[in-house]
Amino acid sequence: MTEPTLQPAAGAKPHLAIIGGTGPLGSGLARRLLLAGYGVVIGSRTAAKAEAATAAVAAGIGPGRLHGADNLAAARQGDIVFITVPWASQAAILEEIKPALAGKLVVDTTVPLVPPKVARVQLPKEHSAALAARVRLGPQVRVVSAFHNVAAQKLAGGGPIDCDVLVFGDDPKDRQIVVELATAMGLEAVHAGPLANSVAAEALTSVLIGINRNYKADGAGIRITGIARP
């Protein structure tokens, strides 16, 4: 396993931006990261909407190092930037914040769901949302994808989550950073190979949506068996 590289400087945790942090997945990730002691900025289309969301995210925790900003300002403030927006919005929002992302690690959580048939796998021409993000952002931005198969409502709670997070990226050191962030949030994460493999987890989200409907499940997830656990 590669050496942990989560800290940008000795003794300092990275500041994290959650673009789309007012939505269910973004706010759940923000809450978990705040609980883990990270500074978090929630990004939204307007700073007022982002600031309004911070009270709900910090409920029962205290605001700590949490604030809101518009998407571009949030991306500028983040050492690591999470993209937690719907597929229909991904391209426009990435173009908006691209000037703030050079040299940074971007964690893309986008799943290419196409309503109304969200339980049917419908992949984009780029083969996956993560590959589309990498093409749009260019080589100056490091892209990792993760958190596709974790139910947002489970992230919003404080308890353990019975599923694995699959982490995809071409650089194992960047994947390790995201694995450590997931671990800090109380999740278990698995190195799942290069960014091209993200297509598997993105497609699996539609499968899990169908399983949830058929079995009336509250956020079905996945577990990888047969591997050593910490």
Image (cartoon, rainbow, N blue to C red):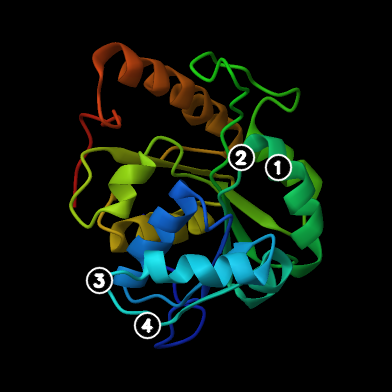
> Are discs 2 and 3 less than 8 Å apart at CB?
no
**Which residue type does callout 1 highlight?**
Ser
Spatial CA distance of label 2 from label 3 is: 28 Å
The answer to whether residue 221 is left or right of residue 57 is: left
**Which residue type does callout 3 highlight?**
Gly
Work out whether residue 103 or residue 79 is closer to the camera in this orientation and state it.
Answer: 79
Position of residue 17 measured from the top left corner of the image (x, y, whole percent): 56, 67
The residue beneath circle 4 is 64
Q: Residues within 10 Å of mark 3 (few under 14, many from 20)?
A: few
**In the image, which disc is placed on residue 89?**
1
Spatial CA distance of label 1 from label 4 is: 29 Å
* Among numbered discs 2 and 3, the one appearing first in the sequence: 3
Spatial CA distance of label 4 from label 2 is: 28 Å
Position of residue 71 measured from the top left corner of the image (x, y, whole percent): 68, 64
Name the secondary structure under disc 2. Answer: loop
Pick the quarter of the image with the N terminus. bottom left
Q: Residues within 10 Å of mark 2 (few under 14, many from 20)?
A: some
The residue beneath circle 2 is 86
* Among numbered discs 1 and 4, the one appearing first in the sequence: 4
Which numbered mark, 2 or 3, is in the foreground of this view? 3
**Which residue type does callout 4 highlight?**
Gly
> Are discs 3 and 1 less than 8 Å apart at CB?
no
The residue beneath circle 3 is 60
Spatial CA distance of label 3 from label 1 is: 31 Å
Q: Which residue is pictured at 51% across the width and 22% down the height?
A: 203
Name the secondary structure under disc 3. Answer: loop
